[in-house]
Image (cartoon, helix red, strand yellow):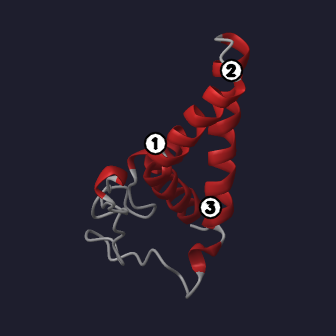
Amino acid sequence: MNKVEGVIKGKCPNCKNGDIFETKGNIFLFRMPLMNDKCKDCNFKFEKETGFFFGAMFVSYAIAVAEMIASLVVFWMFLDLSPLKVFFIISVIAVVCSSFNFRMSRAIWIYMFY
């Protein structure tokens, strides 16, 4: 359970104190999260090699698909909205959750290879 908590909070996998991300980002201000190169507490290097976070793209895709399917089920099946309204709602949810997905996918990827 400690690893799940570390991923959600965005903490260093080595010391569990330092933050992986310097800023959380804000999609409405067009700011993506900024990631620290190393942990400020234990000097753990987050990016092992060039292109290390290429695989995090696939994790982000899986998270986004799960969010979209959950939204589809809730808004179409349970609330019985029209397909066009559901499409626009899912599009908005995908944009709003993009910075969250970015942070979560990178944190998951770091913890997978720690």
Front position among marks 2 and 3: 2
Q: Nearer the viewer, residue 2 or 10?
A: 10
- Read off the residue under disc 2: 82
User: What count of labels does the image hold?
Assistant: 3
Q: Which badge, 2 or 3, is on the more N-terminal residue?
A: 2
Tell me the quadrant of the picture where the C terminus can be found: bottom right
Q: CA distance from mark 2 to mark 1?
A: 38 Å
Q: Position of residue 13 (x, y in %)?
A: 46, 61
Image point 52% across, 38% down: which residue? 93
- Read off the residue under disc 1: 5
Question: Mark 1: which amino acid?
Answer: Glu
Image point 40% across, 53% down: which residue? 10
- Read off the residue under disc 3: 112
- Dividing the picture into quadrants, the one containing residue 72 is top right
Please, what secondary structure does the residue beneath circle 2 have?
A: loop
Q: Which badge, 1 or 3, is on the more N-terminal residue?
A: 1
Q: Position of residue 60 (x, y in %)?
A: 61, 56
- Specify whether residue 84 is in view: yes
Please, what secondary structure does the residue beneath circle 1 have?
A: helix
Q: Which badge, 2 or 1, is on the more N-terminal residue?
A: 1
Question: Mark 3: which amino acid?
Answer: Met
Q: Position of residue 21 (x, y in %)?
A: 34, 62
Determine contact: label 1, label 3, CB under 8 Å. Answer: no
Image point 61% across, 27% down: which residue? 85
Question: Mark 2: which amino acid?
Answer: Ser
Q: Nearer the viewer, residue 26 or 58?
A: 26
Left or right, residue 7 beside residue 91: left
Q: CA distance from mark 1 to mark 3?
A: 14 Å
Q: Is residue 103 above or below residue 66?
A: below
Q: Is residue 80 above or below residue 64?
A: above
Q: Is residue 57 above or below residue 37?
A: above
